[in-house]
Image: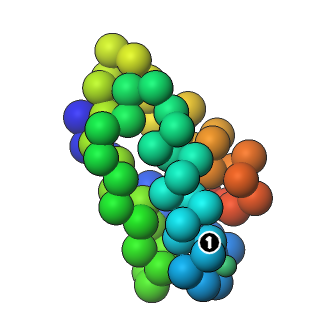
Amino acid sequence: METTIRVHGMTCGGCVASVTRVLKAIDGVEQVDVKLDPGQARVTYDATRTNVDALARAIEDAGYDVT
Ligand SMILES: [Cu+2]
């Protein structure tokens, strides 16, 4: 599965690295591409091991807002 999540609150490359790191740490995430402007995370994942809610929660736990 592939999804693109809108991420608000990233302001620099450090934010991009943080979001990338927390997403890659999730079991079942295969590929992560985070962009700053516009803020978004494109994630390829194994739908039998994780889901969009878990991805969004990880981003929020890292301190960013998701819509
Ligand atoms: Cu930053």
Secondary structure under badge 1?
Answer: helix
Query: Can residue 67 be seen?
Result: no
Occupied quadrant, residue 19: bottom right
Occupied quadrant, residue 49: top left
Relative side of 14 to 33, left or right: right
Occupied quadrant, residue 4: bottom left
Query: Are there few (<14), some (14-19), or many (20+) residues within 10 Å of tag 1?
Result: some
Indicate yes or no: mark 1 CB to ligand 1 under 8 Å.
yes
Q: Mark 1 = which residue?
A: 15
Q: Residue at x 54, y 52 (%)?
A: 21
Measuring from the top left, give residue 30's x and y in whole percent: 30, 38
State the scheme by which the image is colored.
rainbow
Q: How many marks?
A: 1
Measuring from the top left, give residue 15's x and y in whole percent: 62, 72
Q: Residue at x 61, y 75 (%)?
A: 14
Relative side of 61 to 17, left or right: right
Q: Outermost residue, top direction?
A: 48
Query: Relative to 10, does residue 11 appear above or below in the rendering?
Result: below
Query: Can residue 45 be seen?
Result: yes
Q: Residue at x 63, y 42 (%)?
A: 58
Measuring from the top left, give residue 33's x and y in whole percent: 34, 61
Query: Relative to 33, does residue 58 appear above or below in the rendering?
Result: above
Where does the C terminus fall, quadrant-wise? Answer: bottom right
Three-letter amino acid code at the position of disc 1: Cys
Q: Ligand 1 sits in which quadrant?
A: bottom right
Measuring from the top left, give residue 23's x and y in whole percent: 50, 46
Query: Relative to 67, does residue 56 appear above or below in the rendering?
Result: above
Where does the N terminus fall, quadrant-wise? Answer: top left
Q: Outermost residue, left direction?
A: 1
